Amino acid sequence: EACAKVIDGKAVANRIRDEIRAEVSRMKEAIGVTPGLAVILVGDRKDSATYVCNKKKACDSVGIISLEANLSEDSTEQEVLNYISDFNNDPSVHGILVQLPLPKHMNEQNILNAVRIEKDVNGFHPLNIGCLAMRGREPMFVPCTPKGCIELLHRYGIPIKGKKAVVIGRSNIVGIPVALLLQREDATVSIVHSRTINPEKITRQADIIISAVGQPNMVRENWIKPGAVIIDVGINPVEDSNSPRGYRMVGDVCYEEASIVASAVTPVPGGVGPMTIAMLLKNTLISAKRIHNFE
Ligand code: NDP
């Protein structure tokens, strides 16, 4: 039967939001500055629109001001760059987020590189990732989803130092930065990806598995060492005739099996997802504090 502890990302994220709300109002009272986040959404992808809407609501809930730039699918790269430039120079904006993916005709690299690193709350600027990868360097910002994964481990008192961690997936936004963070926390880290032969042999050695793949129920019982801790980043729609929408979201990990073998596991939804948004709010607060020299 299920014996793994459920890592409740929603509850942790709510606590973090409370902390941020208190800090935002303390800052406002002390120096009259309210943190501001600008979100740029290009095109009409439903999922992206939903993410942006959730981020705005989250800002409202803690007192962060959010600005939105909505551009149509056929707008030009230059138009996006113009918005970025305006937000870069706007003193009321402390964080700039470009919702990915961008339309195919745009060069993602040009656009992400244009965000001032002091306002790069997503942490996707190559200078931020570069500092994350280097010993003795501190990035201005750590990407939100990876930071949320590590924060969950910390808040549940799960030790990382000296542990063997395996990350499944090597994307720029999750897999690579989360592996770098685990390494900074003194774990011994392996990364497996779509070209890895017998990935389950490698994951089975892990004390901590972080999966960011995008394949429903890929990680089965035989991938997991008994007692391992599992952080499931995947958000994958699967058909479900019982749901009013006709589908529901599941992770990369077969939750029923993991909850028997593992010692702790994040649910989907309610695990990493809410943490990602909480970390975005946190990065925006950190940025406003740094820009205004407020401790
Ligand atoms: P990408 O598609 O960018 O990357 C997926 C990675 O998984 C790639 O490195 C790929 O390998 C690897 N992969 C694919 N198939 C396999 C396989 N069969 N075995 C091993 N590795 C495989 O995805 P993202 O990193 O952007 O996102 C991953 C998942 O996390 C998605 O479900 C996404 O929805 C979710 N997500 C959730 C967030 C949250 O807030 N909870 C935030 C961001 C993403 P290769 O490099 O060889 O192609």
Image (cartoon, grey):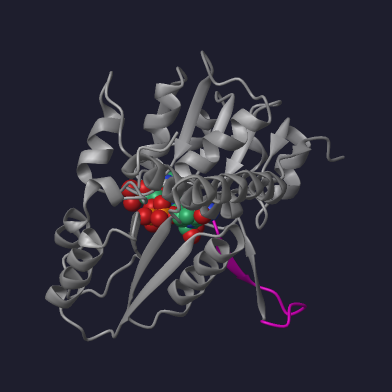
Counting labels gives 0
**Residue 182 placement: quadrant:** top left
**Residue 274 placement: quadrant:** bottom right
Classify residue 164 as left or right of residue 250.
left
Report if residue 197 lies within the magenta region: no
Residue at position x 50%, y 64% in the image:
55
Residue closer to the observer: 179 or 219: 179
Q: Which residues are magenta?
A: 234-245
| Position of residue 149 measured from the top left corner of the image (x, y, whole percent) | 54, 40
Q: From where the camera sits, is residue 40 visible?
A: yes
Residue at position x 45%, y 53% in the image:
32
Which residue occupies the extreme top position in the image? 162
Residue closer to the observer: 83 or 131: 83
| Position of residue 45 measured from the top left corner of the image (x, y, whole percent) | 41, 79
Residue closer to the observer: 57 or 10: 57
Classify residue 144 as left or right of residue 29.
left
Residue at position x 22%, y 65% in the image:
84
